[in-house]
Amino acid sequence: MRLFNSTPFHHQSLSYSKLALACLLALSTAGMAGCDKSTPDEASTTKAETTQATKDSKAPNTKNDELPVIDAIITHAPDVPPPIDRDYAAKVIVKMETVEKTMRLADGVEYNFWTFGGQVPGQFIRVRQGDEIEFHLSNHPDSKMPHNIDLHAVTGPGGGAASSFTSPGYTSEFNFKALKPGLYVYHCAVAPVGMHIANGMYGLILVEPEEGLPKVDREFYVMQGDFYTKGSYGDKGLQPFDMEKAVKEQADYVLFNGSVGALTGENSLKAKVGETVRLFVGNGGPNLVSSFHVIGEIFDKVNVEGGSAENHNVQTTLIPAGGAAITQFKVDVPGELVMVDHSIFRAFNKGALGIIDVQGPENAKIYSGKVREEVYLPEGSAAQSLGNTNTPAPVITAANKQERIKMGKSVYASNCAACHQLNGAGIPKAFPPLAKSDYLNQDPKRAINAILHGLTGKITVNGEEYNSVMPAVALDDEKVANVVTYIINSWGNKGGEVTPADVKAARK
């Protein structure tokens, strides 16, 4: 079965000034045919001609059989332009600008992005197979670099790169025909190509098949990319690009839609129980292959690598750097579905994580939630250690308590939130709460010791007994002080400040 088939359902505005005249002529012909005493064969011929004229009239009349002209609707992620609602080819005008700008990479971390359209990823382009695209690429006058665009949907030298090399303050124009349906990556291809892509210059173009895509309830645009910074993950301030790490493929950040948390919290994608969701997923790279997975869902259909091959009932789909996939699934129960790169440390330690917030009625026959719990205490547990390294990292120090809290929030998000949750609520019977924690409020040094040395054995927090294992975490004194200060000043805890000197003393 082909992946691309169904009735399209979009809207794109065109002028139909000549259509009224065509309709009047058709009505006149029909009226004359009613009085005509032509032979059955002649009547049949007239009917066929009228039917064909009506079908052809869906496309606006143009001079010398020129294609009708349409201005493309292009959208920033996670939004997608509406589906194509026409059954004829058009000349589609696409206008895009390259912009170099400093934006948020993570909380307290900024990066000098190079972009298509001022955001990462670049704007989503949607056209129809057979369309002729007139592409205008403008490079903002404030840019320091020339840029161009290589669209994988283009058949021609460099995918358009050879024709779109554009210096700051200039606009280039070229044309191509959308020959093959599919979901394609576009990116900058100015040397050094890898650096332009690593700085955020990539996006997606969808070429719908002539018959359109099957109708769904919601469509979203998600694109993964890997980033290489001089500092480590979470290090504060403006972080420059690190070519050495990029060449070695040692990414500090692996992100959906250009920043940590771009698809979480208030930015989560929204859906309702019973709806069918389609995700247009791309991977800009420049280096890493994505193992794209939605925790709590099974893809009903996947357009493998964005093409016509269709796979069914898929748990995780590989998306190569410079590639894409279309995933589709129906949501059956409410809750938070978690999008991840299932090379899983990228999700929980480098940022490749997003949320689909599904609202609606429960369905216990499909998913019951927890129905029973009992104590299970195996022996032999021992504290482990996370992240030990012999390589010293530069230490950025907080100047005051407020800075310490702000910097500690980032450390918490990358090291603690997976178990204790972003809101500090923990997980019942597994990971104790840090919010309004009588255990920590009685003695904040307990938090310091748990981070430095790990923690095993029974503890009681807010009247509940916990008997789990927390591994030691290899953080320097500054980061331990920051994260503990953040914890004791958050979620209803009593406040205070822990200093690096306090942590140093606890190491002894």
Image: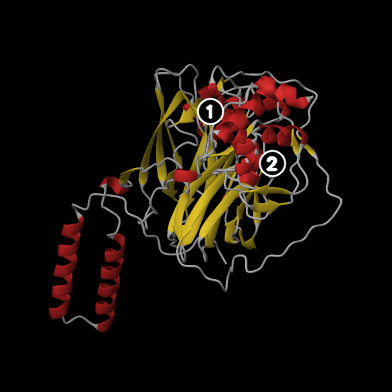
Which numbered tag is attached to residue 45?
none
Residue in the foreground of this view, choosing between 10 and 211:
10
Query: Residue beneath label 1, please?
Result: 406
Q: How many marks?
A: 2
Q: Quadrant of residue 351?
A: top right
Contact check, label 2 and label 1, Cβ < 8 Å: no
Residue marked by disc 2: 345
> Is residue 493 placed above or below 232 in the rendered structure?
below
Does the image show residue 165? yes
Q: Position of residue 223 (x, y in %)?
A: 54, 42
Horizontal placement of 283 versus 56: left or right?
right
Residue at 65% in and 54% down: 316
Please tell me which residue is depicted at 58% across the width and 35% down the height of the picture. Answer: 487
Query: Whole-percent x and y of residue 383?
Result: 81, 41
Where is residue 157? Give x, y as percent.
Answer: 55, 33
Nearest to the eye among marks 2 and 1: give it: 1
Query: In the displayed structure, would residue 209 be above or below residue 111?
Result: below
Q: Residue furthest front?
A: 442
Q: In what quadrant of the picture does the C terminus appear?
A: top right
Q: Given the image, on which type of amino acid does mark 1 rest? A: Lys
Question: What is the quadrant of residue 428 in the picture?
Answer: bottom right
